[in-house]
Every structure is written in C-alpha cells, then in structure tokens.
Image (cartoon, rainbow, N blue to C red):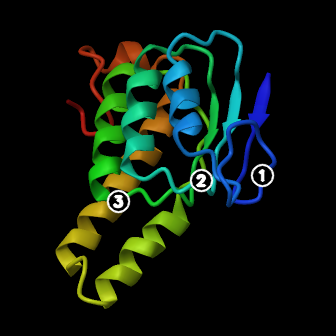
Amino acid sequence: EALSVRGPGADAHGADADGRLGAAGLNLLYDLETNDSLRALDVCGHAMGNAAAVALSKALGANRTLVELAWDENGVTRYGFDVFRAAIARHNYTLRKMPTPLADYAAVANAGKKGGASADELAALRTCLADIEAVVARNNNPTARYECGDGGGADGG
C-alpha cells in the first residue's frame, strides 16, 4: 500500500484550515510503528516540525514494511534530523528510498542568512543529511545488517 497526503491544500480527514494535517498527521506517523502493510508514505508540506522527526524516529524503529518515505517541507531543523538519523541508523533496515528534504535544508540555510544558523551549524546539518542518505543506501544492501556486526549506522557505530 502507498499513502500520499501532501499539504497544504490536501483534502484529508483531520486537516486544519490551511490543509495541513496538524496533530492528526503526528498520530499517523506514530501509528506507523504498528502498521504492517504501508510500503510508501508521502507527508510533505504539513509543517509538523521536529515533532514529525521524533514521531518517525520512534515509528521506524519498529516498522518493518515502510520502504519509501517523503517528508520534506515540514520545517524540520538540525535537531530533528539528528534524532531521525540516530534512530534509523540503529534500528531500521527497511527504509530504502527517501528523497533528501531539500526544502527543509533550504529553510534552515535561509534562516542562517538572517542571523539564525551559523556556517558550522549548516555544515553539521549537511553532514547529518549525508549520513541519512548513507543509511538509506545501506538499507539497499541486503547483507548490510550483518556486515556492521553491531547493527551500527552510517558512521559505523
């Protein structure tokens, strides 16, 4: 099964006035933990912030069926990506396709130009996103889980 609930403007049950899923979207993400049929999910554009990253991290630690995830334009920052990276690196071997959330990266970079994120912060975010890409690539290797020995992530640990 595949589910696409892109926002804003998505006419989805539980959407708020501007078409975003709001709390219903977070519940959907947490419910992935016990879902055993959904193979692809697109929840781009719902501005769920770092809460989306935390929910996905928890869910993907247990979910063994989701192989494709798109979740850009949710306002995730470095903190959220760090949480997500740590969780999938240790506990997920099924996620095999995930476009890099470039709009969220660009939002952090643009905030940096206005005095928000420093150059070091942006470099750390780029490294984090590269690590996430490496984990997804690892998951495309059927023997990767056994090659790491300890089930470690893209950074070997």
Picture disc at residue 10:
1
In the image, residue 99 lies at what x, y percent?
Answer: 60, 51
Between disc 2 and disc 1, whose residue precedes? 1
| Tag 3 near tag 1, CB within 8 Å | no
Question: Label 2 to label 3, Cα distance in Å?
Answer: 14 Å
Neighbours of disc 1 within 10 Å: few (<14), some (14-19), many (20+): some
Q: Is residue 27 left or right of residue 3?
A: left
Asked if one can make out residue 117 in the rendered structure from this viewpoint, the answer is: yes
What kind of element bears circle 2?
Answer: loop
Q: Is residue 62 above or below residue 90?
A: above
Q: Is residue 115 above or below residue 28?
A: below
Neighbours of disc 2 within 10 Å: few (<14), some (14-19), many (20+): many
Residue that extends furthest to the bottom in the rendered view of this protein: 114
Picture disc at residue 77:
3
Image quadrant assignment for residue 142:
top right
Picture disc at residue 46:
2
Q: Amino acid at mark 1?
A: Ala
Image quadrant assignment for residue 127:
bottom left
